[in-house]
């Protein structure tokens, strides 16, 4: 099982049910990133490469995979868009009626595919903005009622 990591600026993290709100490229919630074989998460590597530091690390335990929307291909992005888009964005409230969260994996491949669509008049422009708004392989959980976090290093 791959361990997942949440980084926070708070040493005393308290998680609660998240209010979702439409109108954002990315959903609001508890964001996490898988820990890679290097021992770092994709988010930590993004932070290092972009000179962003100062996070406290928490392991996210037992993410119920059956209730998580997994997006890892262009087809997955298209399905998400076809099923849940409203105008130019995803209606994350509607997504949350069926899933506890969403996980985007295979980010580098998706980014390379969607970069070419990042032209305002392209039919996939809004999907490209969604994918390019992500920084790395990551997921977001808005129903945190069954999620446990523990400090990675005590």
Image (cartoon, rainbow, N blue to C red):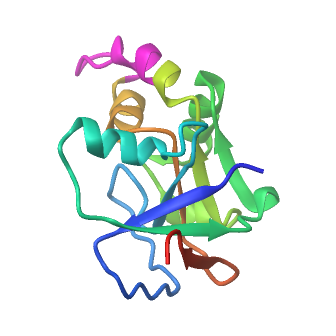
Residue 24 placement (x, y as % from top left): 33, 56
Residue at image position (23%, 56%) is 53
Q: Which residue occupies the extreme front position in the image?
A: 154
Comparing 27 with 3, the one in front is: 3
Vertical placement of residue 12 versus 67, above or below: below
Comparing 143 with 79, the one in front is: 143
The reply, left or right, for residue 93 in relation to residue 124 is right
Residue 82 placement (x, y as % from top left): 58, 37
Residue at image position (74%, 68%) is 62
Can the viewer see residue 18 in this picture? yes
Residue 20 placement (x, y as % from top left): 45, 72
Residue at image position (42%, 23%) is 111
Q: How many numbered dots are placed on residues in this image?
A: 0
Residue 39 among magenta residues:
no
Query: Magenta region's main secondary structure?
Result: loop
- Magenta segment boundaries in residue numbering: 111-124
């Amino acid at each position: 099982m791959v361990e997942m990591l949440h980084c926070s600026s708070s040493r005393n993290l308290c998680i609660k049910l998240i209010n979702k709100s439409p109108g954002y490229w990315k959903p609001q919630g508890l964001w996490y990133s898988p820990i890679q074989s290097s021992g770092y998460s994709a988010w930590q590597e993004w932070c290092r490469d972009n000179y962003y530091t100062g996070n406290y690390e928490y392991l996210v335990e037992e993410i119920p995979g059956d209730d998580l929307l997994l997006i890892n291909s262009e087809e997955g992005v298209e399905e998400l868009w076809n099923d849940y888009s409203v105008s130019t964005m995803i209606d994350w409230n509607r997504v949350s009626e069926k899933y506890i969260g969403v996980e985007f994996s295979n980010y580098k491949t998706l980014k390379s595919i969607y970069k070419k669509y990042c032209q305002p008049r392209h039919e996939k422009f809004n999907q490209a903005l969604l994918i390019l708004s992500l920084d790395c392989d990551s997921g977001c959980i808005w129903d945190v009622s069954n999620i446990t976090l523990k400090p990675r290093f005590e």
